[in-house]
Amino acid sequence: MRKIFSSLTLLFRFVLEISAVIGLAAAAFCEYSLVVRVLYPFLGLIIALIWSRYGAPKSTNSLKGRAKFALECFVYGLTIFCFAMIYDQTFTLIFALIVVIDLTAMYALDLERKETL
């Protein structure tokens, strides 16, 4: 049962990472000001680059422990803030709730050290 829950937690983690980048990039195709349509996709690109360098489990520079947790809080916090600016409040709250549940499960199951099963 633990293996199934761990796998689901990692799956949700992957979906959250992808949806954060896609959600920010999608602002380019919405009816917002030019600043928003340029800035938010750029933030999505920056987040993807930072995450691939320091957050990805197979990266040679992957952060561990508190540094990894700080990176996760920064990335997801920035994403939630941006989502609150451009998307529906309900969508943003659901995304934030899933982030909190996933982070809690990741650290409760000690998956942040072994993100591949």
Image: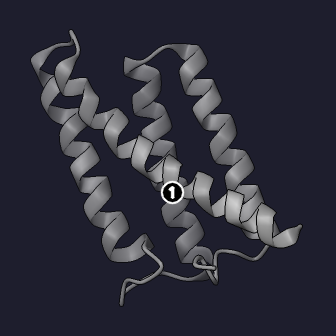
Residue type at tag 1: Phe
Identity of the residue furthest to the right in this view = 1
Residue at image position (42%, 73%) is 56
**Disc 1 marks which residue?**
14
Picture layout, residue 96 above or below residue 43? above
Is 95 displayed left or right of 61 in the figure?
Answer: right
Q: Residue at x 25, y 44 (%)?
A: 43
99 above or below 94? below
Q: Residue 108: horizontal and vertical position, in percent?
A: 82, 67
Image quadrant holding the C terminus, namely bottom right
In the figure, residue 21 lies in which quadrant?
Answer: top left
Placement of 102 over or under 39, stated as above or below: below
96 lies left or right of 62: right
| Residue 78 horizontal/vertical position (percent) | 43, 43
- Up the image or down, 93 lies above or below 108; here it is above
Mark 1 is surrounded, within 10 Å at the Cα level, by few (under 14), some (14 to 19) or many (20 or more) other residues, namely few
> Is 37 on the left or on the right of 76, as rendered?
left
Task: Give the structural element (helix, strand or loop) at label 1.
Answer: helix
Towards the viewer: 102 or 89: 102
Q: Image point 23% across, 15% down: which residue?
A: 30
Identified at 48% across, 64% down, the residue is: 71
Indicate the quadrant where residue 28 lies: top left
Q: How is the image coloured?
A: one colour
